[in-house]
Image (cartoon, rainbow, N blue to C red):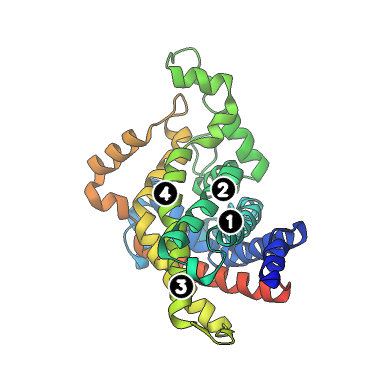
Amino acid sequence: MSSNAGARKDQQSLHYIVRSGLAGGIAGCVAKTVVAPLDRVKILFQASNPDFQKYAGSWRGAFLAGSEIYSRSGLLGLFQGHSATLYRVFPYAAIKFMAYDQFHHALMPTREHETNTRRFMAGAFSGVASVFCTYPLEVIRVRMAFHTRNLNTSTATPIRPSFTYAARFIYREGAAYSETSTSITKSLLDRFPILKFYRGFVVTVIGMVPYAGVSFLSWGYLRSRFLPPSKVGHRKATPMADLAIGAISGAVGQTASYPLEVVRRRMQVGGITRPDRWIKGTETVRTIYQSSGWRGFFVGLSLGYLKVVPMTAVSFAVWQGCKRLLDV
């Protein structure tokens, strides 16, 4: 009994929390780097960038879109926005995995408490916590990946906006509309420009609940099924087992949350199409449905699998590897 109490106390210590967060942050950065080119193509599809919509809908289209990006901007074009991704993903993944460890210990202090409902709750809470802390960085990253032409002109000259350039542009966007727009949301955006970095925030939080909840639920459930406890403890996990279970968890989580992800992407780039006002989630849903029907909510899903499955597999595997290395 005392050993269990000591273990729980150690899991709540600052030293443990820092190591847990470090393991999660490293895992997130490695995983995102692996799939960065696919991530950029997927954002262009989801946000309906007019230069690339002709390719949307298939893996072949994704390959052609990637080829066009490469021909326009070279290898760096495939990683446009990746610097912002790393700025965001390290604290995001660190908070998510660290929070999951803490919620897991709070909700499931013993194996008897490990139920699917509690696994889902621990994952959902950790995902929402990470979003609250890092959302502005996500919006900047999406904007950097979305742009395929100069932000201040109508020319088709390809550019690679820097992190600070994209942040300044978001902060100042819509200024030209201040004399003609009288909407309440426009007034709020003028008074509190920081709100521009939270376009699509509510949809993101709503979408994070099924994504993180289902992902961690699948992760915990599959580990309990295929790495069951024995008299001497849990069967030792291997990197291949972590990769396989992480891949399945990512695919299930992606399927559960993808429509909300499409709505979120549209809202995040809403400052480009309608910089004068806040575009509501219901309006975005209606626009997507009117233009593409129900299929519009799943545009790029096959590419999403191609990206999320290896990303989640690598993320979970590196997270577990770093925890073993850091003795977490």
The dot on residue 96 is 1
- Residue 63 seen: no
Residue for point 53% across, 65% down: 35
* Quadrant in which the C terminus appears: bottom right
First in residue order: circle 1 vs circle 2: 1
First in residue order: circle 2 vs circle 4: 2
Looking at the image, which is closer to me, 305 or 66? 305
Alpha-carbon distance for marks 1 and 3?
18 Å
Q: Amino acid at mark 3?
A: Ala
Q: Is residue 324 left or right of residue 201?
A: right
| Pointer 3 residue | 247
Q: Amino acid at mark 1?
A: Lys
Identify the element where label 2 is drawn. Answer: helix
First in residue order: circle 3 vs circle 2: 2
The dot on residue 251 is none
Identify the element where label 1 is drawn. Answer: helix
Q: Amino acid at mark 4?
A: Gly
Identify the element where label 3 is drawn. Answer: helix
Identify the element where label 4 is drawn. Answer: helix
Q: In this view, which residue lies farthest toward the right?
A: 15
Q: Residues within 10 Å of mark 4 (few under 14, many from 20)?
A: many
Asked where in the image residue 56 lies, by quadrant, the reply is bottom left
Q: Amino acid at mark 2?
A: Ala
| Pointer 4 residue | 207
Alpha-carbon distance for marks 4 and 1?
15 Å
Q: Is residue 224 left or right of residue 30?
A: left
Residues marked 1 and 2 touching at CB (< 8 Å): yes
Q: In this view, which residue lies farthest toward the front?
A: 1
